[in-house]
Structures are given as structure tokens and as C-alpha cells.
Image (cartoon, rainbow, N blue to C red):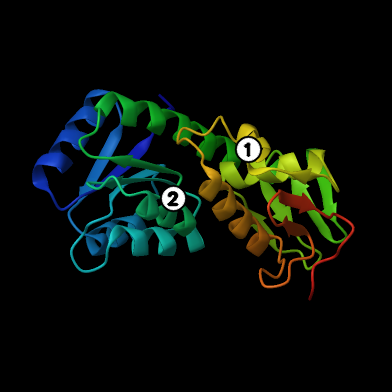
Amino acid sequence: MPADAKVLVVDDDAVTRACLVDYFAAEGYDVREAETAEDAERQLAGESVDLVLLDIRLPRKDGLTLTRELRVRSEVGIILVSGRQDEVERIVGLECGADEYVTKPFNPREILARAKNLIRRVRHAAVAAPVCERAALPVYEGCVLHEDGRQLSHADGVLTALTEGEFQLLRAFLAHPGLTMSRDALMDQIRNREWVPSDRTVDVLVGRLRRKLRDDAASPRIILTVHGAGYRFSPAAPARA
């Protein structure tokens, strides 16, 4: 377990919440709990955590909305918990910025394993970020990938953090410039994710990566869609202003 790891469990179901809180506390985690998204926001405003275990079906503000809002300002680890086996909902959760997605009934040991790996990645990225200049790869003119910090730096000095999936996908593109890569080939590059990637997962990650590269989704110039074949990375094309 990462030292002093803090976990926030957000679930309006008292039984599920107590189960997760007790399980993680027994494993040595510093655990907080919240019944609503609003309560979670109040706690997060006062203290940072490493991981949020977040139920999607919350009263008033739901878990997807909270995920989207958290991801705008934070790289905290987020595991969404849902009572539905719904592929569309899983994809939407990933699009909102969640790192993982699990369904009820769940095995606490599985969530614990995912949590350990995710917290380790989040902390590694936070520690590596200040020295990210040690490993920098040019993406296109004016944009550089800092591998240690898992960040993009743009010509205007803005730093943009990448999730693990986005980072792995960009590394795959950088390793094969100008080559059309099928979704299957790209899925092989992100196979170390704890969730199992699918064709739609690749499309979601490409969409998110385009936004962070400032590539116009309506008329992309950096990550090109090759209909019926996959995607091609065109590093020579600068992003539009």
C-alpha cells in the first residue's frame, strides 16, 4: 500500500459505503466517507485525497457530473462504481475522466488491487512532474510530451496532464509516426489498463487526446481517422491556434 494513502468513499447506500470504508480501513488506508456529491466536494475542498471511490447513481448531482468537475482541476484517482452492467455508461464514465469502472456486486479485493495500482500511478506522476524536463519527446512543433510527469507542454507554456490511457496511446502514436494503426493494434498498446479496452475505448481515448493536443475534432490534422482502418498520427502538422 502506498504510504499514508487517503481514500474518499462516496455512496448514498449506507451498506455499500460501510463495506468499502471498513475494508479499506482494515487494509491500513486513511478513509473518509460521503453520502452525496455535495458532501464529497466539501471534504475535497478542505483536504486532498489520493483516490475517490465514486458511485454513479447519487441523489441530486450524480457521479458522472462530479467526475467531470474533479477532472478539470485535479488528477486524483477516480474509480466509478455502478450497479448496472452498461457498456455505454462505462464509456461515458471514461470520457468524463474516470480511471476505472467497476460494477456491483463487486469483489472488495479486486477494488483494492485496482486502488493500489491507481494510487501508485497518481503519486508517481505527482512526484515526477517537477523534473519532467529529464525526458521530453517532441509531439509536433510547439508541443512536447514529458514522460516523467505524463504531461504535455504547449508553446504558450501551458501544461496539460494525461491519464495513463492517454499517455500510453500517445506513446504508441509517437513510436509509429505516419503509420495507420488499427484499433486492435492500439488496444495492444493499452492492454496494461486494469479495465479491458475495446474498440470504443480507443475511440474515446483518441477524442480525449485530440482535445489535449488542441487538434480540431471536426477536422483533425494531428491524429487522422482512416475510415475502415484505424488512426494515423501526423506529427508534422501543427495544431491550429
Can you name the residue that lies furthest to the front here? Answer: 228
Amino acid residing under circle 1:
Asp
Kindly report which numbered mark, 1 or 2, lies closer to the viewer in this rendering: 1
Quick check: 12 above or below 148?
below
Q: Which residue is identified by label 1?
A: 184
Residue at 61 percent across and 47 percent down: it is 166
Can you name the residue that lies furthest to the bottom here? Answer: 241
Where does the image place residue 172, in percent across and percent down from the top left?
73, 39
**Is residue 4 among the parts visible in the rendering?**
no
Q: Is residue 197 left or right of residue 16?
A: right
Q: For residue 167, which numbered disc appears in the image?
A: none
Where does the image place residue 230, in percent across and percent down from the top left?
69, 49
**Is residue 237 among the parts visible in the rendering?**
yes
The quadrant of the picture occupied by the C terminus is bottom right
Where does the image place residue 6, in percent across and percent down from the top left?
35, 39
Amino acid residing under circle 2:
Ala
Q: Is residue 116 left or right of residue 190?
A: left
Local packing at callout 1 (Cα closer than 10 Å; few below 14, some 14-19, many 20+) is few
Q: For residue 98, which numbered disc appears in the image?
A: 2
Residue at 64 percent across and 64 percent down: it is 211
In which quadrant of the rendered view does residue 209 lie? bottom right
